[in-house]
Amino acid sequence: SVIEKPVAKITIANMYTPNGEIKQVDLCKNTTAILSGSSTMQKCMFGWSKGEEFDLDNVNLQLGDDNGTRIDTADIILSDTTKFYLFVEAENGCYQIDSIRLNALPLPKLEITADGELTANGYKEICSGESTVLKVSGKDAQDKAINNFVWTTPNQGQPTLETITATPAEENAYFKDGKYIYKYEVSGSDKLGCTAKDSLLIYIIIGVSLSL
């Protein structure tokens, strides 16, 4: 008689299911992924491993969920390209191994600049009621310029321009060390959909009233 063998399969639970025999997936660096393993047989033992080669000695086997037909990893924050293996063993001792490589795509690089000089600590100081021009520039991993930006500002919405005029108001800032502080943040995406962020703090200097 033919002894049945489990069929192991890896999918990315919180994103999509690769079709057919896809063995590698491109994901942006720092993406959070959950790998889901499944078997065609019940009451299977599952184990995960990662590295260039499969190492059974470092696999912690455990009974899968749903009557031993599936198991998920904990959240994986993809910092580098990594290969993952799924080991599935049935009650009859037969087993199968599946694998998938997650390629960590580099993030674009962003930089915010302001007119005039910044302080030694890297923030911008302006007097109360004044404005400053902020500009963002960015490049992807191939050193090509990107122009898909979204600003986050407490009182000026979410403009999508490369250059904006920041006019912070004291009532929209937070107060620390005798100064009002206002945070401008911008995100930028490359053609692959990978997103990076940069931010700049603006310190508002409060004027002193003099009376004779």
Image (tube, rainbow, N blue to C red):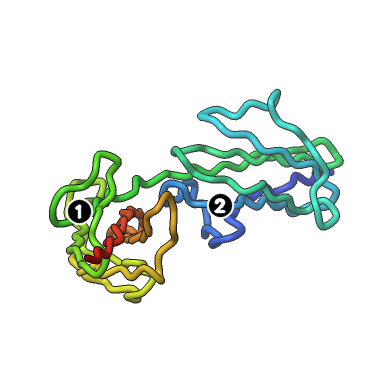
Q: Is residue 134 above or below residue 65?
A: below
Residue at 34% in and 49% down: 107
**Which amino acid, mark 2?**
Ala
For the question of whether residue 134 can be seen, the reply is: yes
Front residue of 200/91: it is 200
The x and y percentages for residue 41 are 79, 52
**Disc nearer the start of the sequence (1/2):** 2
At 17% from the left and 63% from the top, the residue drawn is: 133
46 in relation to 41, above or below: above
Q: Which of 201 and 150 is in front in this view?
A: 201
Q: Quadrant of residue 203?
A: bottom left
Say which mark, if any, is on residue 113: 1
Position in image of residue 45 (x %, y %): 80, 41
What residue does disc 2 label? Answer: 33
Q: Which residue shows up at 86% across the image and 41% down it?
A: 91
Q: Position of residue 14 (x, y in %)?
A: 59, 60
Badge 2: residue crowd in 10 Å (few <14, some 14–19, many ≥20): some
- Foreground mark, 1 or 2, reads 1
Q: In which quadrant is the C terminus drawn?
A: bottom left
| Front one among 138 and 71 | 138
**Secondary structure state at the residue bearing disc 2:** strand
- Spatial CA distance of label 1 from label 2 is 33 Å
Task: Confirm or deny contact between disc 1 and disc 2 (CB under 8 A).
Answer: no
The quadrant the N terminus occupies is top right
55 to 176, vertically: above or below: above
